[in-house]
Image (spheres, rainbow, N blue to C red):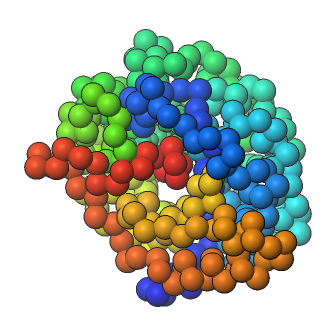
Amino acid sequence: MIDPFGRAITYLRVSVTDRCDFRCVYCMAEDMAFLPKADVLTLEELDRLCSAFVHHGVRKLRLTGGEPLVRRNIMWLFRRLGRHLDSGDLDELTVTTNGSQLERYADELHACGVRRINVSIDTLDPDKFQAITRWGKLDKVMAGLDAADRAGLKVKINAVALKGVNDGEMSAMVAWCGQRGYDLTFIEVMPMGEIGGEIRLDQYLPLSMVRAELQKNWTLDEIDYQTGGPARYVRVKETGHRVGFITPMTHNFCESCNRVRLTCTGTLYMCLGQEDAADLRGPLRASEGDEALSRAIAEAIARKPKGHDFIIDRRRSRPAVSRHMSVTGG
Ligand code: SAM
Ligand code: SF4
């Protein structure tokens, strides 16, 4: 699949549920209204859709959410998708998780062919962790990380930089990730979805400031490591591990974009920062064969926009994109 700007689309991110057992302040309102179950694709339908994308040249699949590991019987989908790893049609099957269910699932994920996972942790302070996630418990996530290590899963930590919340702990997180053998990626808050009461401008911390703070304690060597995504990486000389910076607000990363995002209702977003989307549930359910679905996928890829236009500023109090991050999974 090649889009109108010559970019090969080889990476599909799939939000398998909009539900979550946390309520992170930058992601969801506490009283979120979730989708009726009938609108959500079955696991069989998700398998069919993902497999169609693999057939069209997707080499990497990431399951996300909401919290992917709270969806009932989700391991069935991992196991099914694992067959594309066995056949060599897929290079990587991976997951982004809040870690709350990892203790239970780490071994099974590895058995399904998952080798690397992203775990989101914004702070190492249990009280702050609870304040940020509203419903999360840090010790449960830590137990999940221990299980992931034992299972042989390679972990990358994602941390959203939040002004006045975790900005004093960035260096400590680099040290902790170094000790545990994890790469770490910092993410800028993106203006997605109404989150009730919280004001984005107050949360927004440019990563240039995080980087300046880190440089007081660490030697950050520039490296030429690219994943086709929005992260730019350095290597921390003292730990030997990578630190990435996802800076959608201050940098344009769109020219190398290799990905599209599917929601749990079968809506395909060709860009994280734009409203345009294609319905794949209709063609999926219209027939048992995949012809209509293949046509709809090709039409959607032909509409992939050049880039996003996120803005957080004082004149715009409304989010640039009205859907929440949990719809497309980041
Ligand atoms: N529940 C899983 C988790 O937290 O890792 C997967 C879904 S979550 C939506 C994916 C990533 O998006 C997490 O790392 C989260 O911190 C990040 N995220 C959520 N809302 C965000 C926002 N408004 N701006 C930037 N990152 C956000
Ligand atoms: Fe849930 Fe992840 Fe959103 Fe937090 S960031 S509320 S864990 S989906």
The relative height of residue 89 versus residue 21 in the rendered view (above or below) is below
Where residue 129 appears, as percent x and y from the top left, is 45, 20
Q: Give x and y (percent) for residue 36.
A: 62, 41
Left or right of 40 on screen, residue 224: left
User: Residue pushed farthest top?
Assistant: 127
Residue at left offset 58%, top offset 67%: 279
Label tally:
0
Relative to residue 195, is residue 260 drawn left or right?
A: right
Q: Residue at x 45, y 46 (%)?
A: 325
Of residues 246 and 193, which is closer to you in this image?
Answer: 193
**Near-viewer residue (128 or 27):** 27
The residue lying at 29 percent from left, 54 percent from top is 320
Residue 202 lies in quadrant:
top left
Q: Can you say whether 220 is above or below 271 in the image?
A: above
- Residue at 76%, 82% in the rendered image: 291
The reply to whether residue 270 is in sight is: yes
x%, y% of residue 212? 24, 42
Q: Is residue 243 visible?
A: no
Q: Quadrant of residue 189?
A: top left
Relative to 143, does residue 311 appear above or below in the rendering? below
Spot occupied by residue 317 in the image (x, y as percentages of width and height): 19, 44
Q: Quadrant of the N terminus?
A: bottom right
Q: Is residue 136 above or below residue 156?
A: above
